Image (spheres, rainbow, N blue to C red):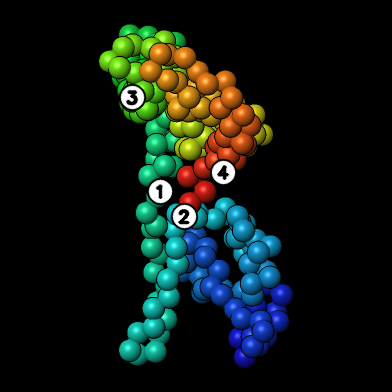
Amino acid sequence: MIECSICYNELSTFRSLSNFPCTICIEKGDQLKYVCKSCLKKWPDSCPFCRQELDHTLKVDTIRTPTGKNLEIIIKQKQCCCLKIKKCFNKNMDIIGKLPDCFTIYSWCQAITKVLLLHISFGFLAFVFIFGICNNHNDGGLCWICILCGALNTIGSWILMYLLFGIIKDEYRLYFSILYGFVASLSFILAILVDNKCSINTLGLLLFIPALCSWSCCGYHCNLTKCE
């Protein structure tokens, strides 16, 4: 009978065993360890055998050869694109936070350009989207409320970008989600309430409270760094 390498309980119908995904032990040539699911949950981030941290971007796959031998193959999982954006953003912000000298002035300017382009692209799409909804009610005139809605939605798109890519820390996520909900819902409600005379139907502002709750919940839960 196969036993769990941690608690030494035998395999049963209700207690299945799994391969412990420690790539360091496999690279050292150690035999693959089998552990039960309860023990596997107790060691989510480190290996109980070599005491090293687990690399969750690597996966251990077991292949059985025609001769009956088991081969352990280390497979590198594809990293989510949002994690790459977050890593690139944090790297550029670290470069910007340091005062440049003659050797780092080029990388400093390059980092500022990348961060600005990211903000401009998000802000431009958000401004054009909400301005098109708002200005659709006007007869070719320029309404100041539509410009205000575009500015609010641009700020909301930047906050959503920080929430989406996990740039904001978890302890501040709730506050930024409420701020995003306030800005985004206000810009959208104002945009749909503007008439052709650039005035607002104040009765429609009653939609602001449910819109605030909906946008805040959406901002709080839209964290792409949690995807696998």
Looking at the rendered structure, which numbered label has been put on residue 221? 4
- Marks 1 and 4, Cα distance to the nearest angstrom? 17 Å
> What residue is at 45 percent from the left and 67 percent from the top?
60
Q: Foreground residue, 65 or 188?
A: 188
Whole-percent x and y of residue 18? Answer: 56, 75
Q: Are marks 1 and 2 in contact (CB under 8 Å)?
A: yes
Label 3 close to label 4 by CB (< 8 Å): no
In this rendered view, identify the residue nearer to me: 36 or 176.
176
**Is 142 or 44 nearer to us in this picture?**
142
What amino acid is found at the position of numbered circle 2 in the picture? Answer: Glu
Q: Earlier in the sequence, mark 1 or mark 4?
A: 1
Sequence-earlier tag: 3 or 2? 3
Tell me which amino acid carries mark 1. Cys
From the viewer's perspective, is the residue at label 3 or at label 1 nearer?
A: 3
155, above or below 80, in the image: above
Q: Which residue is mark 3?
A: 136
The amino acid beneath tag 3 is Asn
Earlier in the chain: of badge 3 and badge 1, it is 1
The structure residue drawn at horizontal position 48% and vertical position 51%, both measured from the top left corner, is 227
Question: Which of the 4 quarters of the picture holds residue 149?
Answer: top left
- Residue 80's label in the rendered image is 1
What amino acid type should be assigned to the residue bearing mark 4?
A: His
In the shown orientation, is residue 131 left or right of residue 228? Answer: left
Report x, y in % for residue 51: 62, 57
